[in-house]
Image: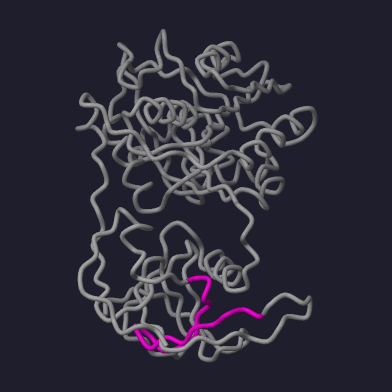
Amino acid sequence: MACNVACGTAGKTCNAACVTPPTRSDDDVRCAAYASELGVNEQKRLRVLCLHSFRTNAKILETQLMLRGWLKRLRDSVEFVYLDAPYACSTDEALRQDAAVREYFPTETYGPYREWWNASANGEYARLEATLKHVDDFIVNNGPFDGLLGFSQGAALACSLANLAATGDFPHRFGFVVALSPPPPRDPRLKLLDGASVPTKALFCVHERDLVVPAAATERLCQKFTNATLVRCPGSDHAPPKFSGDSLPLVAAFFAEVLQAPPLPPPPPLSRQSSGQSPKSPKRSLNIAGASHYVKGKNGGLVREAASLDSAEVALLPTLQPVRVVEHRALPTRPDGRPGVERCRIVEPVRGWVSRRCLKSVADLTSEEPSVVVSGGPGPPAL
């Protein structure tokens, strides 16, 4: 049986390669797995893809949102996932970045500056096609995402993706977009010029005296969204607004509404004009030979040596990993009176115990995971 697991205990042997997920720290992954094991993360937490500004990067945007209070205020309801633009700026290009950015976010600490595109005199964006494919590939491997958040150029990209998705020109759907000081996109391929009407729920935040992107420009873009909230913040700096003061109730109310929103429908077919720009994602092949179940939880499945939750960790199985279950056992009733966690003993691809809530029968794979092509026959029925 094929296996791709991350081992969790020093000195343990495992018959598979250990892999660290690319977008989340080891601590984040393990904490999420603990929560899944105990069944304490059943409340919905939004996953938001974050897109940085021109000639900065993902790490800088994360720092900006942290300093401005977004991460602290929304940590219980939102998981922010950050993506670097595909193009890394040269040394000469980095030196042309604003002096304040270079002082507060030096490349020696934060890594190379990046950009999503570079505009020409006629309004066309160089490297736009590469950027759309880059985002598409990232969502295929790390999505889905409930919504988008962007700052400045990243906000212009977020608005464009929401529009392309709504018109069927991008193969992913988004329930909302948060745009922080976005300039209106000028490239006609993004379809946000005159006459555009975007139905995606949107939150626009702008500083009233922004010296880089005038507030009036952001407001013109906001008017193209038919279900948009505009938050005007005092100040003249070009930065994500502070999550405080008069803007706090409006922003908090927006996310509260989004949390109550119904699930998104599947994406519409790509239009002929754009089918070459951002191809549909290929299906994933999965060999289930000998398996009875697969890991269904997005946080993976944490395997322990024994059924008890305080026993040593053996491995962290990734989502969609096939396993063979040979025994089920319910732990004693919890102190608060809730039923004990149901545990399953597995013998492949590793030996140990995993939470039943993290598993699903391989018989449900084709209906539950339409992007997966199944090969091999299932193993004997679980005991």
Q: Residue furthest top?
A: 194
Q: Residue at x 31, y 46 (%)?
A: 137
**Where, quadrant-wise, is the C terminus in this rendering?**
bottom left
- Could you tell me residue 174's position as x and y percent? 46, 36
Q: Residue at x 31, y 79 (%)?
A: 291
- Residue 164 or residue 20, whichever sits in front: 164
Give the total number of marks visible in the rendering. 0
- Residue 87 or residue 32, whichever sits in front: 32
The answer to whether residue 254 is left or right of residue 130 is: right
Colour scheme of the rendered structure: one colour
Above or below: residue 159 compared with residue 378: above
- Could you tell me residue 368's position as x and y percent? 38, 58
**Where, quadrant-wise, is the N terminus in this rendering?**
bottom left
Q: Residue at x 43, y 70 (%)?
A: 360
The answer to whether residue 243 is left or right of residue 265 is: right
The answer to whether residue 165 is left or right of residue 241 is: left
In magenta segment, residue 342: yes
- Residue 108 or residue 294, whichever sits in front: 294
Above or below: residue 367 compared with residue 229: below
- Could you tell me residue 171's position as x and y percent? 33, 37
In magenta segment, residue 43: no
Q: Residue at x 69, y 20 (%)?
A: 232
Q: Quadrant of residue 104?
A: top right
Q: Quadrant of residue 203?
A: top right
Above or below: residue 322 compared with residue 161: below
The answer to whether residue 168 is left or right of residue 312 is: left
- Could you tell me residue 68's position as x and y percent? 68, 39
Q: Which stretch is magenta?
A: 340-358
